[in-house]
Amino acid sequence: MDHDDIQDLFRSVGPVTIKRMFGGKGIYVDGRIIAVELRGGLMLKGDVEAGPLYEEAGGRHWRYTHNKSGKEVAMPYWTIPEGAFDDPDEAEKWARIAVEASIRAAK
């Protein structure tokens, strides 16, 4: 996604700042990370409250296998539900859930 697409998708939660990170992009609102764009995929910030909502809507939890230990590592991000890309109301719903998860994580 380019910067304009990201800005459009998250417009409902306010202006976003986009920073390069992990070979992708970190997406921030009010200085808090709410999403990452990595390898062409967009993942929303989640936690124990938001994760089940994302999964119920078809989102997948970001997990990877650590190179040295071989252990699976779960990151606090879930893929954005597909409907959010085509429906501004859906995009707003998921963006707000990501913002709320980010606020909780900061506490």
Image (spheres, rainbow, N blue to C red):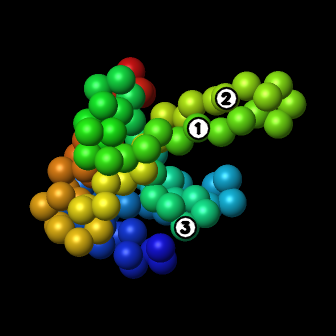
User: Residue 48: x percent and y percent?
Assistant: 35, 23
Who's the residue at 35% across and 70% down the image?
7
Identity of the amino acid at label 3? Gly
Disc 1 crowd rating (10 Å Cα; few below 14, some 14-19, many 20+) is few
In the picture, measured across the screen, residue 95 lies left or right of residue 35, that is left
User: Residue 40: x percent and y percent?
Assistant: 55, 67
Residue holding disc 1: 63
* Disc 1 + disc 3, Cβ < 8 Å: no
Residue at the right extreme, as displayed: 68
Query: Residue 72, labelled with which disc?
Result: 2
Query: Residue 1, labelled with which disc?
Result: none
Q: Earlier in the sequence, mark 2 or mark 3?
A: 3
Q: Earlier in the sequence, mark 2 or mark 1?
A: 1
- Quarter where residue 70 is shown: top right
| Between marks 2 and 3 in the image, the one whose residue lies nearer the viewer | 2
User: Residue 32: x percent and y percent?
Assistant: 42, 43
Disc 2 crowd rating (10 Å Cα; few below 14, some 14-19, many 20+) is few
User: Residue 12: x percent and y percent?
Assistant: 20, 60
Residue holding disc 3: 40
Identity of the amino acid at label 1? Arg
- Quarter where residue 17 is shown: bottom left
* Disc 2 + disc 1, Cβ < 8 Å: yes
Q: For the residues marked 2 and 3, what is the alpha-carbon distance in whole angstroms?
A: 22 Å
Q: For the residues marked 1 and 3, what is the alpha-carbon distance in whole angstroms?
A: 16 Å
Who's the residue at 37% across and 60% down the image?
16
Query: Which residue occupies the foreground of this view, 6 or 14?
Result: 6
Label 1's element? strand
Identity of the amino acid at label 2? Glu
